[in-house]
């Protein structure tokens, strides 16, 4: 893990950069899932606009975080108080440097503080091995989610961490 990774809460002024990070991560990092289907990619990205992100940031039941590597935004994550991890995206050129792991650790910490006993997510094929390395396990068969096959996964969150 790169020692210079810093995780901080996202703010409304970060909405544009968050949207760009998510778009690049989807276009490049999730190509295995969308197979460069322009219509599917557009549908996926449209739901991550700066307007959507600002609305998420205004919702007290959601937490968005930002990974900074050498003071440059390189990743974003989001969790909902119910335990759903709904985003974890890293700029492709920063893959495998620890930003995703740090984002997820921070999201899980936020959920633990809220007393949430379990984190859940829907993993694309591209992210499945990453989430398994973090301790997530399959909780149901693959399902079609926003046009791509997604694997429901979960992880128990010890409240004493």
Image: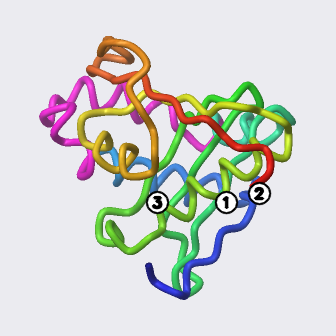
| Image quarter in which the N terminus is found | bottom left
Tell me which residue sits at (26%, 24%) in the image.
40
Q: Position of residue 49 (x, y in %)?
A: 54, 39
| CB under 8 Å between discs 2 and 3 | no
| CB under 8 Å between discs 1 and 3 | no
Magenta stretch in the rendered image: 27-51
Tell me which residue sits at (44%, 28%) in the image.
153
Q: Is residue 114 left or right of residue 1?
A: right
| Image quarter in which the C terminus is found | bottom right
The residue to which callout 1 is attached is: 14
User: How would you classify the magenta stretch by its main secondary structure?
Assistant: helix
Q: Position of residue 125 (x, y in %)?
A: 24, 35
108 inside magenta stretch: no
Q: Is residue 8 left or right of residue 132?
A: right
Nearest-to-viewer mark from 1 and 3: 3
Q: What is the spatial separation of the Cα atoms under label 2 and label 3, in whole angstroms?
A: 19 Å
The residue to which callout 3 is attached is: 100
Q: Position of residue 43 (x, y in %)?
A: 36, 24
| CB under 8 Å between discs 2 and 1 | yes
Q: In the image, which disc is placed on residue 11?
A: 2
Q: Dot 1: few (<14), some (14–19), or many (≥20) neighbours within 10 Å?
A: some
Tell me which residue sits at (76%, 57%) in the image.
11
Q: Position of residue 150 (x, y in %)?
A: 33, 23
Tell me which residue sits at (54%, 71%) in the image.
73
Residue 61, compared with residue 53, is above or below; it is: above
């Amino acid at each position: 893990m790169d020692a210079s990774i810093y995780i901080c809460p996202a703010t409304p002024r970060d909405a544009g950069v968050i949207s760009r990070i998510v778009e690049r991560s989807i276009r490049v990092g999730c190509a295995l899932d969308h197979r460069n289907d322009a219509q599917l990619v557009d549908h996926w990205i449209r739901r991550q606009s700066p307007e959507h992100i600002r609305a998420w940031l205004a919702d007290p039941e959601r937490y968005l975080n930002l990974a900074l590597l050498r003071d440059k935004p390189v990743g974003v994550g989001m969790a909902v108080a119910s335990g759903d991890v709904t985003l974890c995206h890293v700029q492709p050129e920063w893959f495998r440097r620890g930003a995703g792991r740090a984002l997820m650790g921070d999201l899980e910490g936020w959920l633990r503080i809220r007393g949430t006993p379990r984190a859940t997510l829907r993993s694309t094929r591209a992210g499945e091995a990453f989430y398994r390395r973090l301790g997530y396990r399959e909780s149901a068969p693959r399902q079609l989610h926003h046009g791509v096959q997604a694997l429901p996964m979960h992880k128990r969150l010890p409240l004493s961490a």
